[in-house]
Amino acid sequence: MTRESIRGSSDRSVLILTSLADSPKHGYALVKDIEEFAGVTLGAGTLYSALAKLERAGLVAALPEQDRRRPYEITMAGREQLRERLSESARIAAVGLRRIAGAPS
Amino acid sequence: MSRRMRWLLALYPRAWRKRYGREVAALTEDLIGAGTATPLRAGLNLAATAAVEWARAVARVTHAGTLSLVVRNLVFTIVVPGLGGAWLPWWLLTRDGRSVTVAGWEAVPVIAAGTALYVWCVWNFATVGRGTPGPWDAPSRVVAAGPYRWVRNPIYLAALLVVLGQAWLFMSLPLLAYAAAMAIVFHVFVIGYEERTLGYRFGRDYLEYRRTVPRWLLRPPRRSSSA
């Protein structure tokens, strides 16, 4: 598995929720922020497809449009979900890192 | 919005496009403008995502029971209006080997209007109340939308329009008598059964609705009841 393919499979919902966790953002700000902290550039279609799914699930909410850009914010349920997902990832990461360190390469 | 963009957005399911189309178009322009995406990549990404959204929309329809709602309303339409508004009038017209002649083509718009009104009512029962016009599979809440903002019993009015239109179309006294009988039966059924049942079932919601919208006569809706 290459580094690229790990990136490709990283969950977009987690990236978006993580990006929204500190402040509401509109589409362009989301793409730029995610690019910065995760090194992945989402396409416009990909981003909105994921946003639509999150909005339907009540994990993010749309705010009123500000000169043709609509910001999105994370909801309480979204925060809860993100916390769960990240804690789980952290647990698995810890185990993985420990095993890698212990095993002969 | 560019023509190319409009064309790409046309690939999406309508509901999705209406909600997110403008935003996705704006973001695409921004990304291309900032050099983050090339037009080709952006186009491919939008087309691929459209396929994903269609798959989701189809899955949602088959899972949320919308398919069954469509089938239930089709069955009701074939059985009840089909029998009472088509088969029975036809039987009345052609009984004892009578031949049918069209006498007044002017009646066609009346029949069409009645049919359209019926379809509009069913649409509201299905989308707002997730039910059918059949009392055994009725909407789950008071439907006060569409034609129901003007009058409480538009389906019965639609049925009368269709049958009266047919009576006119074929200049048939038996059909006129049939329409009159229908009107009496509807009135008795509405007063004796439906209004009581709806009162028990929906309580205050229905009483409030009954207070604001007339039973048979059309009245323009008030602004507050338009939601």
Image: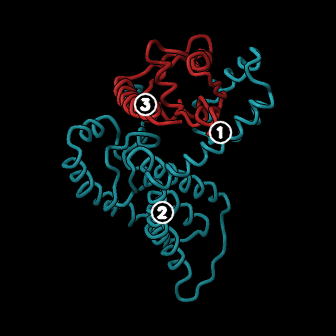
Chain colours: A red, B cyan
Which three-letter amino acid code belongs to the residue tagged 2?
Val
Nearer to us: label 1 or label 3: 3
Disc 2/disc 1 C-alpha distance (Å):
30 Å
* Front residue of B64 and B174: B64
Q: Quadrant of the N terminus of chain A?
A: top right
Q: Which residue occupies 35% across, 38% down?
A: B213
Disc 2/disc 3 C-alpha distance (Å):
50 Å
Which three-letter amino acid code belongs to the residue tagged 1?
Thr
Chain of the residue under the numbered disc 3 shown in the image: A
Q: Are marks 1 and 3 in contact (CB under 8 Å)?
A: no
Relative to B114, is B33 on the left or the right?
right
Coordinates of residue B132 in the picture (x, y in percent): 40, 56
Residue underneath mark 3: A93
Q: Residues within 10 Å of mark 3 (few under 14, many from 20)?
A: few
Chain of the residue under the numbered disc 1 shown in the image: B
Residue underneath mark 2: B71
Disc 1/disc 3 C-alpha distance (Å):
30 Å
Q: Which residue occupies 74% across, 29% down?
A: B42
Q: Residues within 10 Å of mark 1 (few under 14, many from 20)?
A: many
Find numbered disc 3 in the image and state the secondary structure of the residue it sits on. Answer: helix
Find numbered disc 2 in the image and state the secondary structure of the residue it sits on. Answer: helix
Residue underneath mark 1: B49
Q: Which residue occupies 54% across, 76% down?
A: B90
* Front residue of B69 and B120: B69
